[in-house]
Image: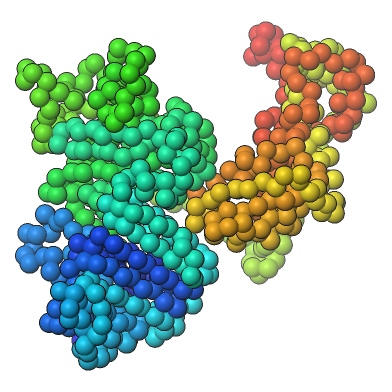
């Protein structure tokens, strides 16, 4: 039987789409303040936003009638017809945020439209109170307390106070960057985290990331095909351990978009190594009719009418700036006086018919529509090509029926598992026996290219990579010693201080116990920094910058730091540096010591997975010389 849900139920369901964590409450309330024309916005939170969130603005405010409607679902001043969805210039437009937040919290709004008369209205779990006169300046103060107090199932899925605060700090950082003309103040548990004064993007960048980031960035402002791309790009050698330093704003709205991300990443591809990510704060301004902002419940992504045009424009600008070609002069806000730039433009191949300027029109820029038509016929995108998701084809799967086989005697599941395990162990034991040879039976025949040692045993020859083999022997010794060691820390003469953003700090703080287990003495140092005052005694030579870069890169795969993984990388590096190198000539005694150290293991691999031994039988050589076929 179908029946209508009561408002108390469907409002909580709707709240789950719009408000999943405290950071989303902050996002919705600040967006409302921006849309109200506020020039000063203050955000205060307690206990990661779980206990209290308060947003104060000096915007247009509301009168008594609008205040009552503000708590209603789908009540908005930003849309009136369905056509307005295709011409959205505001951050909010659905009219769901206030009603959704009020359904799962204790909420109060105090507002004044003229600065003289103010009203307040409370709502607890969706139950409205009465409008009352109040004291307040022009603008609005929204207070949200006890988030999810009436939805215990949602409450238990909230993260720690530190992690929730970090995610709110990430949202606030994006607001400072996206609206540099607005003065923001963000306070968490009585501590000021961010403060900006509305004095431009450069100042906002410094407020969020510090002066060092600004010094390592290039400011750009480019317009192609009716699309404007402006903001800051990190220099080629300025990279981060994860993507939390990447900000994209489409028509003023922060989004995470795969098309633009792929374009920027591919432009940086030849300058960055694995687990290095570019830094950027970019603004993409496009005509409202070519972007759909109504495709995600939290408006966290947008959809473009044509991904190829967007990808091509972003890639061409970023790659031109990074490569330093002649086109870059058009895009730099502060171009060098005497640039040494090659004459060619490296974005599109010469075969591409029209990109940038249209022939026969005195260099006039193509419009977005013209660019779309041109790109529909011929696009050439270098360095990794167009994002895969633009051209993905459905995968055809062929299902084959298994071949009939004789019926097996009935056994219990436990017996099946036991038998399977025994068979696996027997196969592994047999394989290990096959991969081992008695070192005393090996006869040394010499070396090849001062890198490969040659041994013979019966009808087989063994070619041993001296570096790979020695590296594995040293690694196994280091690992055995490390596994058996007691943790000994070595104090540092000068403590190492690492500056982080809020998300990185929360991640690292969560993993302090693991790092201390290894032997690091690490602690909080300021709002978003950590101090290392001692390191493991057997890892004294490690580069702490590189080490913590590797640790923070764990955020990308959403995995926790594993002690074994951290140590394996460092031990492998130490073994690689200490091992004999290719090109070094070994004496017969040294070669003998190496083969004994291998203990006859001809299946040995170096810590990075390369084979240390290649075995060839006499018959293999005879086939090469056509003695046998």
Q: Tally the numbered discs.
A: 0
Residue at 30%, 52% (x, y): give it.
198
Quadrant (top left/top right/bottom left/bottom right) for the N terminus: bottom left
Q: Residue at x 62, y 39 (%)?
A: 546
Examine the rendered structure and indicate whether residue 31 appears above or below residue 398.
below
Q: Is residue 328 left or right of residue 589?
A: left
Residue 47 seen in this snapshot: yes
Relative to 195, is 96 above or below?
below
Q: Residue at x 22, y 17 (%)?
A: 351
Between 563 and 427, the residue placed more toward the observer is 563
Image location of residue 274, percent across then percent down: 52, 36
- Does the image show residue 257? no
Horizontal side of 250 relative to 216 (left or right) equals left
In this rendering, is residue 406 above or below 285?
below
Does 460 sit above or below residue 290? above
| Residue placed most toward the observer, 125 or 371 | 125
Side of 331 where 152 appears, left or right: right
User: At 35% across and 84% down in the image, what residue appears?
Assistant: 106
Q: Is residue 10 left or right of residue 162?
A: left
Q: Nearer the viewer, residue 207 or 582?
A: 207
The image quadrant where one finds the C terminus is top right
Which of the 4 quarters of the picture holds residue 549? top right
Residue 265: image location, x then y, percent: 39, 36
**Image x and y of residue 502, in percent:** 49, 56
């Amino acid at each position: 039987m179908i029946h209508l849900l009561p408002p108390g139920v469907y409002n909580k369901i709707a709240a789950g789409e719009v408000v999943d964590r405290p950071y989303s409450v902050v996002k919705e309330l600040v967006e409302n303040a921006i849309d109200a024309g506020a020039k000063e916005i203050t955000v205060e939170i307690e206990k990661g936003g779980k206990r209290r969130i308060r947003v104060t603005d000096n915007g247009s405010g509301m009168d008594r009638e609008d205040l009552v409607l503000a708590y209603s679902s789908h009540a908005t001043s930003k849309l009136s017809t369905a056509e307005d969805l295709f011409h959205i210039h505001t951050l909010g437009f659905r009219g769901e945020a206030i009603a959704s937040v009020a359904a799962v919290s204790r909420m109060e709004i105090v507002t004044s439209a003229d600065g003289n008369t103010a009203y307040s209205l409370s709502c607890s779990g969706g139950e409205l109170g009465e409008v009352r006169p109040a004291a307040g300046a022009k603008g609005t103060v929204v207070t949200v307390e006890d988030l999810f107090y009436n939805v215990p199932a949602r409450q238990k899925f909230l993260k720690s106070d530190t992690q929730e605060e970090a995610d709110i700090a990430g949202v606030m950082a994006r607001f400072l960057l996206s609206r540099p003309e607005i003065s923001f103040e963000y306070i968490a548990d009585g501590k000021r985290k961010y403060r900006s004064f509305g004095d431009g993007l450069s100042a906002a960048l410094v407020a969020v990331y510090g002066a060092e980031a600004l010094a390592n960035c290039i400011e750009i402002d480019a317009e192609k095909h009716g699309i404007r791309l402006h903001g800051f790009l990190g220099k080629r050698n300025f990279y981060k351990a994860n993507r939390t330093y990447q900000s994209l704003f489409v028509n003023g709205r922060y989004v995470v978009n795969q098309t633009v991300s792929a374009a920027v990443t591919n432009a940086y591809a030849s300058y960055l190594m694995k687990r290095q990510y570019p830094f950027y704060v970019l603004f993409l301004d496009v005509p409202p009719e070519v972007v759909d902002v109504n495709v995600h419940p939290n408006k966290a992504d947008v959809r473009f009418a044509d991904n190829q045009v967007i990808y091509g424009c972003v890639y061409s600008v970023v790659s031109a700036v990074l490569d330093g070609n002649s086109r870059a002069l058009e895009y730099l806000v502060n171009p060098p006086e005497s640039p040494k730039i090659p004459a060619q433009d490296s974005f599109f191949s010469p075969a591409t018919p029209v990109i940038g300027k249209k022939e026969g029109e005195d260099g006039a820029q193509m419009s977005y529509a013209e660019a779309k038509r041109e790109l529909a016929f011929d696009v050439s995108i270098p360095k990794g090509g167009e994002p895969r998701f633009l051209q993905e084809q459905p995968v055809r799967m062929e299902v084959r029926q298994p071949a009939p086989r004789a019926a097996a005697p009935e056994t219990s599941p436990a017996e099946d598992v036991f038998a399977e395990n025994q068979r696996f162990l027997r196969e592994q034991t047999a394989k290990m026996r096959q991969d081992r040879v008695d070192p005393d039976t090996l006869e040394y025949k010499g070396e090849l290219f001062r890198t490969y040692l040659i041994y013979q045993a019966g009808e087989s020859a063994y070619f041993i990579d001296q570096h790979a083999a020695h590296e594995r022997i040293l690694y196994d010794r280091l690992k055995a010693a490390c596994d058996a060691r007691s943790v000994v820390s070595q104090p540092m003469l000068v403590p190492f201080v690492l500056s982080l953003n809020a998300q990185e700090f929360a991640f690292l703080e969560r993993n302090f116990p693991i790092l201390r287990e290894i032997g690091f003495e690490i602690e909080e140092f300021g709002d978003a920094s950590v101090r290392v005052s001692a390191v493991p005694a057997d890892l004294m030579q490690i580069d702490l910058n590189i080490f913590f870069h590797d640790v923070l890169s764990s955020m990308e795969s959403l995995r926790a730091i594993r002690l074994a993984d951290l140590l394996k990388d460092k031990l492998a590096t130490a073994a690689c540096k200490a091992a004999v190198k290719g090109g070094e000539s070994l004496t017969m005694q040294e070669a003998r010591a190496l083969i004994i150290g291998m203990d006859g293991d001809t299946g040995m691999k170096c810590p990075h997975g390369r084979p240390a031994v290649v075995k060839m039988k006499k018959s293999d050589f005879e086939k090469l010389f056509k003695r046998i076929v």
